[in-house]
Amino acid sequence: MNEQEREKWYLLQQRKYGIPVEYLKREFEDELSGKVPMDRPLEIPDKMEVVFKYSYGQQSRFFREIRENKKMYGAQCPQCGKVYCPPRAHCSLCYQPTEWVPLAGTGVIKTFTVQYISTSAFIKKVPFICAYVQLDGTDFLLMANMEVDDVARIKVGTRVKVVFREERQGTITDFYFEPME
Ligand SMILES: [Zn+2]
């Protein structure tokens, strides 16, 4: 292909697949300018999209209770009595199958970070807080995002409560924490 034909090819592939022209040039310039021998395997751009169902397995009730009933649940070991949230199907200490227990949805911040830099998906939310929360009645820490006007208010030891979003989709972002004080 001559230069004009190559430019046309690049623009066509860019429109078709959303690949930046600079990437196309890097990958295909040798091919299109005739530097690759005729018998060498020919590579062309393509795109793969995957839509699939994701299973929460034995953590499913945790997400259903949030979506349907705005309730937080933990999982308790019948042998040692430890309560997990995030829930676990089996106790990691004694391997017993756990049982669901309702939680109040309040807790305390054990540690946290303030995010000032983010990927484009969350850039509008910075600065935001990612906290490890020990929910009342549990023995482990749940990592969750917080929504708070002034991040300087948040300290280790701050009491928090869960807030359920109006539109819930059965995902971990169906809730967040806010300070109680
Ligand atoms: Zn146990």
Image: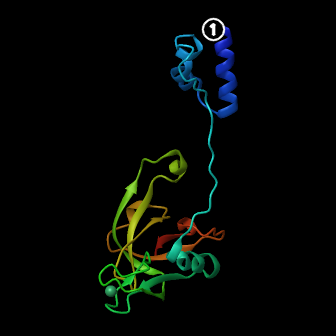
Q: Is residue 99 above or below residue 31?
A: below
Which one is nearer the viewer's eye here, 160 or 15?
A: 15
Residue 156, position as x, y percentages in the image: 32, 70
Seen as rendered, the residue at the extreme front is 39
The colour scheme applied to this rendered structure is rainbow
Assign a secondary structure to mark 1.
helix
Ligand 1 shown in quarter:
bottom left
Q: Is residue 66 above or below residue 3?
A: below
Residue 63, position as x, y percentages in the image: 56, 75
Q: Residue at x 42, y 60 (%)?
A: 129
Classify mark 1 as within 8 Å of ligand 1 or not, answering yes or no: no
Residue 172, position as x, y percentages in the image: 53, 67
Residue beneath label 1, please? 3
Residue 110, position as x, y percentages in the image: 32, 72
Q: Residue at x 43, y 75 (%)?
A: 86
Residue 19 visible from this viewpoint: yes
Q: Residue at x 50, y 83 (%)?
A: 73
Q: Residue at x 69, y 16 (%)?
A: 8
